[in-house]
Image: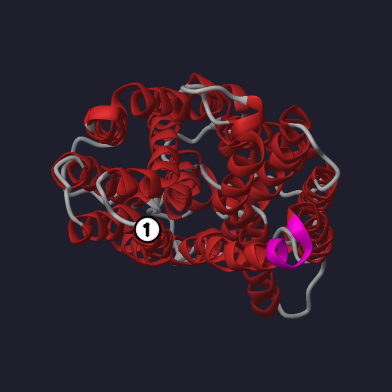
Amino acid sequence: MKSTSQLMARLPKIGVTRSFSFSNPKAAAAIVVFASFIGMVLGPGITNSYGVFEEEYENRFSNKDTGKGALSPAIAIASVHVSVNYLFTTIAGALCERIGMGLTTFIGGVMLGVGSFAAGFCTEVWQLVLTQGVLAGAGVGTIFIVVSTIPTSWFSKNQGFLIGVVHSGSGVGGLMLAPLTRFLINKYTLMGALKIMGVFLAIGITLVSLGMATKPEELVDQEEEENIDRIPNNDSVSEHKVSTLAKKRMSVRSFGVRDVHSTGGVLRSQEFWYLNIAVMLAEAAFYVVLFFLPVYAIGLGLTSEQGALIAGVANGATIVGRITIGYIADLSGNINMFFITHLLVTLSCFFLWFPAKSFMIMMVFACTFGLFAGSLTPMVPLCSVTLFGQNGLANNVGLLGIGMVLTTSAAPVVARVFYEKLGQNGAGYGTVALFCGGIYFLATLSIFALRMSVSRKPWAKI
């Protein structure tokens, strides 16, 4: 029988980009996770705190640039920001494979910082669309694809929990950066706040980029050899059987359940398209709910303070949800939890949000929604690892961003039309809830199809 080293040469390697040498791998892994968490706080976190800017833009531009019944200019800025964000996850995913994680993160930080700083000089909506919408959105998408995927290269166990911790940073960022932005606006005006935030974000992401290192190849090889060495080494086990067992040992980490090793192979798999449809629908509905919760609450007769509290609770619940659901996913399977959480979100939209008429019911919905819907972002890389392995993870997750560009652009606008055209008699509020519930229902069906295509055994850990 051939030696372990000979067998290793025949097995596909995990694709790694530029890495640093660390004397203490555990300390290095902790640094990567911490840097990724801070990257989430500063990158996607600034997007989650956009509501503060939206209020200012409404006061500044609505009366001047829009007439009665026209769509809010703030929605245009937000829609472009989110759409370009997802577009650049695709571009940055491919970029990671070519120039490395650290440099890609640095480029994202420059775009985010320059976009925010330049917005501080803008006096027209179209200028803000180009700066805070396009340039800053591109920066956030570039940062996100790195910090959301790189921690999985360092851990073969407890990936769900660790990715949940990292992704909770976007919720923490929303809670921290929103009051910070409000303070800066009150003290230095809107334009001054944008300039200060631009410098702050550029410096912060530059420091984060220093910690964006993939696991050194020698450590990956060592881990794979240890996995193979655990397989019984005797004449009764054939070389082919050893290779098969080795792949099973490392299936989630290196190969995935579909054992594909190229972008073309990923795109040709039906599992990718099931995952793509689910993510593009669920992500669009997620932002519609977050953007409309305060407005929806006020439309029900609640105060603006209560509406802000409901939105804050929903954001806060995503922090708990991402960590908790990630931990449970380690025990029950990533795709299984992806399906369960979105089934519960669908039911909450129909049976909690739609009939809600009181502050208490809206708070219950906000908690339920944040807890389960917030798990979407960590579930995406985790499900991608389950399906296609660690190899090329950033590129594989980035491919999902193309579809999200379309849905995240269209969904908020469609929901806004429902709200503004039907909202005068109260019907618009219920229509938005049903609209989001319907989108989540379609996403859940796609996740169910994904689960069945991988395994039809109901209790399989997938």
Q: Examine the residues drawn in magenta and state their main secondary structure.
A: helix
User: According to the image, what is the colour scheme of the structure?
Assistant: secondary structure
Relative horizontal placement of residue 56, taking residue 246 as reference (left or right): right
Q: Secondary structure at mark 1?
A: helix
Instruction: Pick whichever, 73 or 303, lies toward us.
Output: 303
What residue type is disc 1 on? Ala
Say which residue appears at 84% left-offset and 63% top-offset.
203
Counting every numbered tag in the picture gives: 1
In the rendered image, residue 181, in percent from the top left (x then y), is placed at 66, 62
Relative horizontal placement of residue 225, taking residue 113 as reference (left or right): left
Q: Which residue is mark 1?
A: 314
Up/down of 412 relative to 330, above or below: above
- The residue range painted magenta reads 184-189
Quadrant housing residue 52: bottom right
In the rendered image, residue 144, in percent from the top left (x then y), is placed at 64, 49
> Is 325 a magenta residue?
no
Estimate how packed mark 1 is, as few (under 14), some (14 to 19) or many (20 or more) residues with alpha carbons within 10 Å: many
Relative horizontal placement of residue 442, taking residue 17 as reference (left or right): left
Task: Say if residue 12 shows up in the picture.
Answer: no
Task: Say if residue 306 shows up in the picture.
Answer: yes
Instruction: Pick whichever, 144 or 65, lies toward us.
Output: 65
> Is 188 a magenta residue?
yes
In the rendered image, residue 46, in percent from the top left (x then y), is placed at 63, 54
In the rendered image, residue 188, in percent from the top left (x then y), is placed at 78, 63
Instruction: Pick whichever, 176 or 442, lies toward us.
Output: 176
Relative horizontal placement of residue 325, taking residue 8 as reference (left or right): left
Up/down of 20 relative to 8, above or below: below
Say which residue appears at 47% left-offset and 49% top-offset.
377
